Amino acid sequence: MTVTTAQPAGSPAAAGPSAAARVRDRLRSGLGLIGPRHARHALSAEQVDSLALPIGDDGVVVGVDAEGQPAVLGLNRPTPYDVVLIGSLWTAQVLALRAAATGARVAVETGRAQAWMQMVHAMGGGQNGLAVYEVGRVPPQGASAGTPVLVVRDCGMRPPRGRVVSGPWQSVVTLLPYLSPVAPRLIRQARLVGVQRISPDEAAELGRTMALPRPDIESLPTLPDGVTLWCADRDRQYVMTQPTDAEIGLLGTPRRMD
């Protein structure tokens, strides 16, 4: 038995060849098939405040916080960004490696070029994002949104004023091995300050300079290797830098003294 069903008026079958011809014309023009039609989604002004978007930080993972969550440092910015790290060469080198891994070009200004050459060779002789310059010899880097730059200044206790300063898409990290007479000036200019283990006297002086609370001042002389107190405005966070196997093979394990 053959069952036939009447086609309602206006259906594709009732439309005849003209409907098929229209579909073929749309396919030839590159418009593709007509998809399903849905009602528009609209929110009132009052409902907009209830939206929550999972937007995370974008930048270099410098370690994990006290809860074991990734701590991210956003170095590639459209505005000038100065960072002071009172700590170890090891931490500065890990930061440089990870910044280069995100696509940034890294320019190192240093008076101890030999300490950086192993990294340069491991990254292809300076052709893959990391170059080392003598103090005062860093050329203009031509930073842009497509090619952000990180300048690492490893110039000792009294770094001279740099020829290349922070700017759009060019951040500067100044490494100080200890608290020095120029540290207060650099800290005032910085947007972010990282502090690793220092002596009790240095901690007390830094506490006055940065208005640190008493618990932080007391903890600074006891920080383990690889732990940094990062301070930005009124925000403070302790972060442990955990090296990867590749970083251990290149730089060794975390250490405060170089």
Image (cartoon, grey):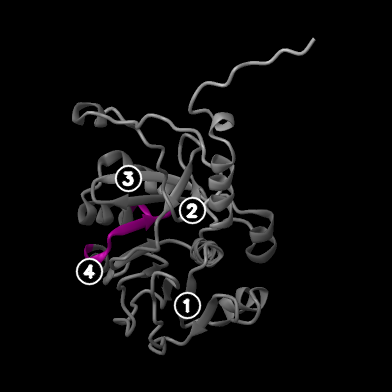
Query: Is 147 left, or right, of 4 in this rendering?
Result: left
Residue 163 relative to residue 8: left or right: left
Residue 223 in view (yes/no): no
Mark 2, secondary structure of its residue: strand
For marks 3 and 4, give the CA distance: 20 Å
| Image point (25%, 56%), residue name | 205
Q: Secondary structure at mark 3?
A: strand
The numbered mark, 4 or 1, whose residue comes first in the sequence reads: 1
Residue at mark 4: 185
- Asked if labels 4 and 3 touch by Cβ distance under 8 angstroms, the answer is no
Q: Residues within 10 Å of mark 2 (few under 14, many from 20)?
A: many
- Is 40 in front, or is 203? 40
Identify residue for label 2.
62
Q: CA distance from mark 4 to mark 1?
A: 21 Å
- Residue 78 lies in what quarter of the image? bottom left
Q: Amino acid at mark 4?
A: Arg
The residue at which mark 3 appears reads as: 236
Quarter of the image for the N terminus: give it.
top right
